[in-house]
């Protein structure tokens, strides 16, 4: 990757949370942590995508599509197992990062009685339209519900969900090249 | 799930969720602005919405921001909507929205 992916250029304080989702899961914090950071689990709840994380600040965070391509080539920014993981979540579509800026995703895992409260925050360093944000807003509830289902029942949730048309249209307007 | 339905069974609380849907991540003061509700009433409703996990709060700098959390509503959908119905339901909602000019 080029230098732009390096965290030393990243000022986290400039990012504002745009989407924040919370889910309660009957599991231990380290189980949730493992499910968020391992390909074996993520394939079951994340539309078949494999999470490959080098779990240290500055380590690579990759989300690999079922066809083997790198859908997301990110970087670990904060790594405090099993409580907090912040990563750059930059989708590898040509021109996307240039048009939207970087995306920061933080998972926070807190014990809540016998369960765990998992909070996902998607933050950006500039205002983005609802059309652009609709991608995450559609995808994350399905991903988090799937994660809960895998951890609580061992059974994956087969949600099939194409990206929202309004997001694809907005990206196209911004000059982002869409795959396929 | 009981808490979700109880929280949603109130027009004032649905109005607060509508406001967050229109603009996510608001402070209590922003949420109160222009509402015919006292600050205490809004605080009380927000607490019920937070207990039901329909609203999540986050500290950002010195502000406490409120975010709409649709995850429980998604789970309700997963429970009663079958996989193959989703696309048809989305199409129907889109049609309704267009015919009613977004006023749903």
Image (cartoon, coloured by chain):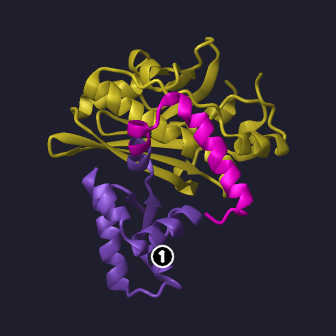
Chain colours: A yellow, B purple
Which quadrant is the C terminus of chain B positioned in? bottom right
Q: Secondary structure at mark 1?
A: helix
Chain part drawn in magenta: B76-104
Q: Residue at x 61, y 11 (%)?
A: A68
Q: Which residue is mark 1?
A: B31
Specify whether B72 is left or right of A94.
left
Q: Pick whichever, B89 or A166, lies toward us.
A: B89
* Residue drawn at the location 67% of the way across and 40% of the way down: A164
Residue A87 location in percent, x, y? 50, 36
Identify whether B25 is placed above or below A148. Answer: below
Q: Nearer the viewer, residue B78 or A54?
A: B78
How many marks on residues? Answer: 1
Q: Is residue A28 left or right of residue A91?
A: left
Residue drawn 29% across the image and 34% down it: A82
| Crowd rating for badge 1 (residues with CA inside 10 Å; few <14, some 14–19, many 20+) | many
State whether residue B62 is above or below residue B40.
Answer: above
A178 relative to A8 in the view: left or right: right
Q: Which image quadrant is residue A96 in? A: top right
Numbered disc 1: what chain? B
Q: Position of residue B13 (x, y in %)?
A: 40, 70
Residue B102 image offset from top left, x and y in percent: 68, 62
Residue B6 is covered by the magenta coloring: no
Prevailing SS of the magenta stretch = helix
Q: Is residue A52 in view?
A: yes
Report whether residue A135 is seen: no
- The residue depicted at 39 percent of the width and 20 percent of the height is A41
Name the residue furthest left: A114
**In the image, residue B19 lies at what x, y percent?**
53, 69
**Does residue A100 sit above or below B9 in this rendering?**
above
Question: Farthest top residue?
Answer: A68
């Amino acid at each position: 990757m080029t230098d732009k992916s390096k965290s030393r250029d990243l000022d986290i304080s400039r990012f504002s949370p745009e989407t924040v989702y919370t889910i309660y899961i009957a599991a231990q914090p380290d189980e949730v942590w493992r499910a968020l950071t391992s390909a074996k689990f993520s394939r079951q709840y994340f539309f078949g995508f494999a999470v490959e994380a080098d779990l240290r600040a500055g380590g690579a965070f990759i989300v690999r599509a079922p066809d083997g391509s790198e859908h997301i080539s990110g970087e670990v920014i904060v790594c405090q197992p099993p409580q907090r993981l912040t990563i750059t979540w930059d989708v590898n579509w040509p021109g996307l990062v240039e048009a939207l800026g970087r995306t920061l995703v933080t998972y926070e895992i807190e014990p809540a009685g016998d369960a765990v409260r998992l909070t996902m925050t998607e933050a950006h360093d500039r205002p983005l339209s609802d059309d652009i944000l609709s991608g995450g807003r559609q995808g994350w509830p399905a991903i988090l519900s799937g994660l809960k289902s895998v951890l609580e029942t061992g059974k994956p949730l087969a949600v099939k969900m194409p990206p929202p048309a309004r997001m694809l249209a907005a990206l196209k307007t911004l000059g982002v090249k869409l795959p396929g | 799930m009981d808490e979700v339905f109880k929280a949603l069974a109130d027009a004032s609380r649905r109005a607060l969720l509508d406001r967050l849907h229109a603009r996510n991540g608001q402070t209590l003061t922003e949420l109160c602005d222009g509402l015919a509700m006292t600050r205490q009433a809004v605080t009380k409703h927000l607490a019920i919405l937070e207990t039901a996990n329909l609203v999540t709060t986050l500290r950002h700098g010195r502000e406490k921001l409120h975010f709409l959390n649709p995850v429980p509503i998604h789970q309700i959908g997963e429970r009663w909507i079958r996989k193959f119905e989703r696309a048809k339901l989305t199409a129907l909602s889109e049609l309704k929205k267009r015919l009613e000019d977004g006023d749903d």
